[in-house]
Amino acid sequence: MDILTTEFFQRALIGGVLIGITAPLLGLFLVLRRLAMIGDTLAHVSIAGVALGFVTGVYPIAVGLVFALAASFAIEKLRKAYKTYAELSIAIIMSGGVALASLLFSLGKGFSVNVTSYLFGSIYTLGNTDLVWIAAVTVVILASVGLQFKELFMMTFDEDAAAVNGLPARYFNLMMSVLTALVISVSIKIVGALLVSALLTIPAACSLIVARSFKQSVMLVVAIAEAAVIGGLLLAGVWNLAPGATVVLLLIAILILLLAVKNGRRV
């Protein structure tokens, strides 16, 4: 286990632990609100921003963050325009993100290898600047959720009733979209844009199998994600595996195990 003493692995572990808190925590709210696919959408748009960052020589994660934030505002606008078919907003923005990313790839073929690391994750290349961004986003997420937990709970389970009781539904919807954009923009270098939605949704799916209350779900979703992140990184480090993929596959294994145990109890 000499890898534990290396600086690159320690940075990877710190970044993974921080994302293991914020991504599944927000993912639980998204899953319960049937907005699980928003993660994929913002991740694809972020990749377009990352590609633009390489083209212009600007810090890629910062540009990806700007793109993800713009996409979150656009999704909310489209959701208002298509109230009956709100999922259309996600499909439209995702299509635009993929198209823009493809266009930028064609403009700068020389950086395609660098962008690939954002598609599939490159947690071992995290630098101190990346950790600062991740830590800042973690503080923002925890503060926002902690200070407005009751309001977010009401919005999650009955948005109409929350609005009737005076809660500004538009503000909280936009806030969740912005927070999700923040998490995804700093997560894509850890697990990759193609896998980031797994960190948002699979821990939530696991917790909903065994949790008996919403508060219990919140605690379990973080615990499950952290177990998968730490375990996945250790396995990947020892056996020289792709870290992002290992974390996601471990999450899936946990989900299968919990489903098997639950079904076994019913028999």
Image: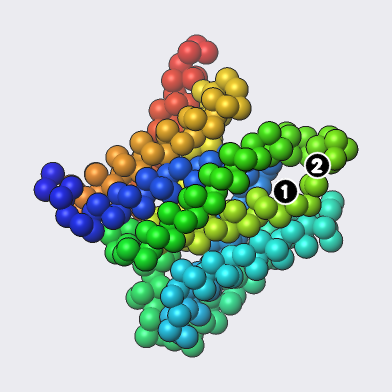
Image quadrant where residue 216 sits: top right
Q: Amino acid at mark 2?
A: Leu
The amino acid on which the numbered mark 1 sits, given as a three-letter code, is: Phe
Q: Is residue 254 left or right of residue 94?
A: left
Give the structural element (helix, strand or loop) at label 2: loop
The tag on residue 125 is none
Name which residue lies at 80% across and 42% down: 167
Which residue is pictured at 57% across the width and 70% down the height?
Answer: 66
Residue 104 sits above or below residue 190 on the image: below
Of 219 and 207, nearer the camera is 219
The circle drawn on residue 172 is 1
Residues marked 1 and 2 touching at CB (< 8 Å): yes
Quarter-of-image position of residue 27: top right
- Camera-side residue: 16 or 144? 144
Category of crowding for the residue at label 2, using alpha-carbon neighbours closer than 10 angstroms: few (below 14), some (14–19), many (at least 20): some
**In this rendering, does residue 208 appear at all?**
yes
Q: Position of residue 84 (x, y in %)?
A: 84, 51
Applied colour scheme? rainbow
Cα separation, mark 1 vs mark 2, equals 8 Å
Q: Position of residue 10 (x, y in %)?
A: 25, 52
Image coordinates of residue 220 in percent, x first then y, are 48, 30
> Which residue is found at the position 37% from the left and 66% from the top?
129
The secondary structure type at the circle numbered 1 is helix
- Return the disc, 1 or 2, that comes first in the chain's sequence: 2
Q: Using residue 68 as the reference point, say whether residue 9 is left or right of it.
A: left
Vertically, is 231 above or below 257? below
Q: Which residue carries the number 2 mark?
A: 167
Question: Along the horizontal axis of the image, is 244 left or right of 215?
Answer: left
Q: Position of residue 64 (x, y in %)?
A: 52, 69
Residue at image point 60% right, 42% down: 145
